[in-house]
Amino acid sequence: ETGVTQSPTHLIKTRGQQVTLRCSSQSGHNTVSWYQQALGQGPQFIFQYYREEENGRGNFPPRFSGLQFPNYSSELNVNALELDDSALYLCASSFYWRVNYGYTFGSGTRLTVV
Amino acid sequence: AQSVAQPEDQVNVAEGNPLTVKCTYSVSGNPYLFWYVQYPNRGLQFLLKYITGDNLVKGSYGFEAEFNKSQTSFHLKKPSALVSDSALYFCAVRPSSTSGTYKYIFGTGTRLKVLA
């Protein structure tokens, strides 16, 4: 098992720019969720993908969007970056039928917006 | 509103002593409960879960957690703390849902410091 891999590990962007974060799910995992962890806070659910479709979304604006590919890898896109978007972004994967048993998290991408 | 509370920002304990990290939750239905640990510059590592059955759940690295339905609590425990246990601990709950969205609600985290 290779685990969940996220890239890049760190990123600095300017306010107003767009960013794409990438995630490779653990082998065979067909469900992926993205979380935002602001400094000193717990992770907040952004959205979940299953079978290449978004099937759940947290309280995040539409400028946060995602994709899931046939190989189950995933992207998180954020448009019109704001300073408050600075955070650690975590990708988590699981088999759909085993989500109740816990996700496998990646190490995250730390995004800094200046 | 559904929520998870970790009332202590930090817990200090001497090495070899028992430790407890507290968690309470407020969700409808029968929740699924989890503990995760986060080391510096790392993602979350799964420690243990409660789905159903025995109220005392055993997990990784000697950790266990006690589910108390009447108090809506899920406290993390370890009989003898190690310096290497020092990390940030998150309690999470997944409300029972029919929508197919497996959203986790996390607490704000408790920093555990084990002193040698």
Image (spheres, coloured by chain):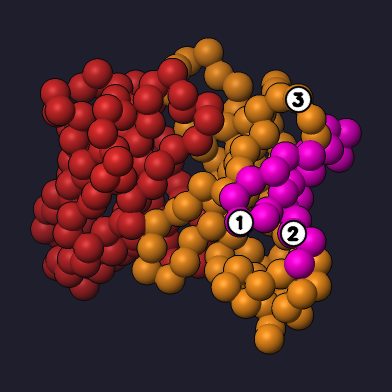
Confirm whether the magenta stretch covers residue B73.
yes
* Residue shown at 38% from the left, 63% from the top: B42
Sooner in the amino-acid sequence: mark 2 or mark 3: 3
Query: Residue B14: percent from the left, percent from the top?
Result: 76, 80
Q: Which residue is mark 3?
A: B53
- From this viewpoint, is residue B52 visible? yes
**Regarding mark 1 in the picture, which secondary structure is present there?**
helix
- Chain drawn orange, letter? B
Three-letter amino acid code at disc 1? Tyr
- Position of the N terminus of chain A, as image quadrant, is top left
The disc numbered 2 marks a residue on which chain?
B
Query: Residue B75: percent from the left, percent from the top?
Result: 76, 50
Residue B95, above or below B42: above
Dots 1 and 2: beta carbons under 8 Å? yes
Q: Which residue is mark 1?
A: B61
Q: Residues within 10 Å of mark 1 (few under 14, many from 20)?
A: few
- The span from disc 1 to disc 2 (Cα, nearest Å) is 9 Å
**Regarding mark 3 in the picture, which secondary structure is present there?**
loop
Three-letter amino acid code at disc 3? Gly
Residue, far top: B98
Query: Residue B12: percent from the left, percent from the top?
Result: 72, 77
Q: Which residue is mark 2?
A: B78
The disc numbered 3 marks a residue on which chain?
B
Dots 2 and 3: beta carbons under 8 Å? no
Q: Residues within 10 Å of mark 3 (few under 14, many from 20)?
A: few
- The answer to whether residue A34 is left or right of residue A53 is right
